Image (cartoon, rainbow, N blue to C red):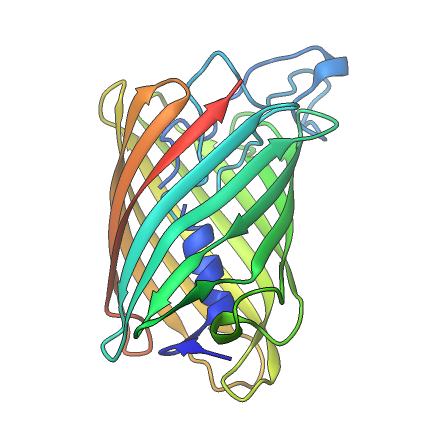
Amino acid sequence: MNYCCCITISTLNLFLITFAPHSTQAGESTTKPNEQRGTLLNWASTGTGGPDLNAPLITDRPDFTEASVTVGRGITQIELGYTYIDSGDNDLHSLGEVLLRYGILADWLELRLGFLPIVENGKSGFSDLYLGFKIALTPQQGLLPEMAIIAQSFAPTGSQNFRSNDWQPGLNWIYAWQINHFISTAGSTQINRRFDNVANNFSELAQSWTVSFSLTEKVGFYSEWFALIPLSDSDSQNQHYLNGGFTYLINKNLQADIRAGWGLNENAQNFFAGAGLSIRFQ
C-alpha cells in the first residue's frame, strides 16, 4: 500500500473528493408540498426546503465541507477537478477527481460515486472507489441549520500502489446557515475508518468550517479551515489546513472553480492547489 507523506491514500481520497469550494448559495431552499418535500425531516410543520432546480446548481466542490443539500430526484450532477499537492518529499497530481451525484427515490436522497486517477513519483493508477448516500435532513429555519448526513465508504478496488487494505466506512454530518444573500457559513464533522502506515486500522475525525461570500451573481469566494485528527493509536498525526478559492457560475447548470491551501502544522502537506468544473443535467 502506498502513502503520501503522512496521509494514507484513503484519507487523501477523502481530502480530494470532498474538497469540493461549494456554490456560495449553500443554505438556500425552496418550499414544496409535503408529497414532494426536499428534506427527510422538518424543524416545523411547514416548509420542506431541498433542491431548487430553477436556481443555480450547488456543488460539493471546491471546499472540504460538503453542500448541505442533495441534487434532487432524477438529477445527475458530475463534478470534476485537478489537484497538485506538495508534501515536501513528494509531489502528487490528482487528475479527474470524478464525483457522480444522482438523486434517487426522493429529492432528499442522493447516490454518490467517486474515484481519482493519481500520479505520484512516477507511479500512476486509480484510487479506491468512493461510495456514499447523502440524506438531506432539515431545511434552515431561523437559527436552526440546514443539515445533511452522508453514509460513505472507500472500497478496496484501487490500483496496487493506491489500494487500501479493507473497506473504510464513515459518516459525515453537515450543518449550514444562509446568513443573507451575501454570506453563508457551514461546518462538517466526520468519523471514518483509516489505516496507518503499518496497516493498523483506526478512527479518524475530520472537522471543518467554511465561510462563503457571493461577490457578484456569478462570482463566489470561500475561506475554510479543516483538520484530520486520529482518535486512536496510529502512526498518523493531527493535520490542520487553511484554504480558499473562487467559483464562477457560467450558467445555472455549469460552474468552474479554483482553490489553494496550506498546511498549518508540520504534519500537514505543505501546499495544494487545483481547479474544477461541475455540470448539472436536468
Q: Residue at the far bottom: name it.
A: 198
Quarter of the picture containing the C terminus is top right
The x and y percentages for residue 76 are 56, 28
Observer-nearest of 204 and 133 = 133
Q: Quadrant of residue 216?
A: top left
Where residue 22 sits in the image (x, y, percent)?
39, 37
* Residue at image coords 36%, 45%: 81
Rendered view: 94 above or below 163: above
Residue 12 percent location from the top left of the image: 44, 65
The count of marks equals: 0
Residue 63 is left or right of residue 78, and the answer is: left
9 in relation to 211, above or below: below
| Residue drawn 46% across the image and 33% down it | 177
Examine the rendering and report whether any part of residue 65 can be seen.
no
Please give left or right for residue 91 compared with residue 115 in the image: left
Give the quadrant of residue 164. Answer: bottom right
Q: Is residue 157 left or right of residue 264?
A: right
- Does residue 89 sit above or below 162 in this rendering? below
Residue 82: tell me if it is visible.
Answer: yes
**Height in image: 124 above or below 50?**
below
Name the spot of residue 95 as percent of width and height, x first: 36, 53
**Residue displayed at 45% across by 40% down:** 60
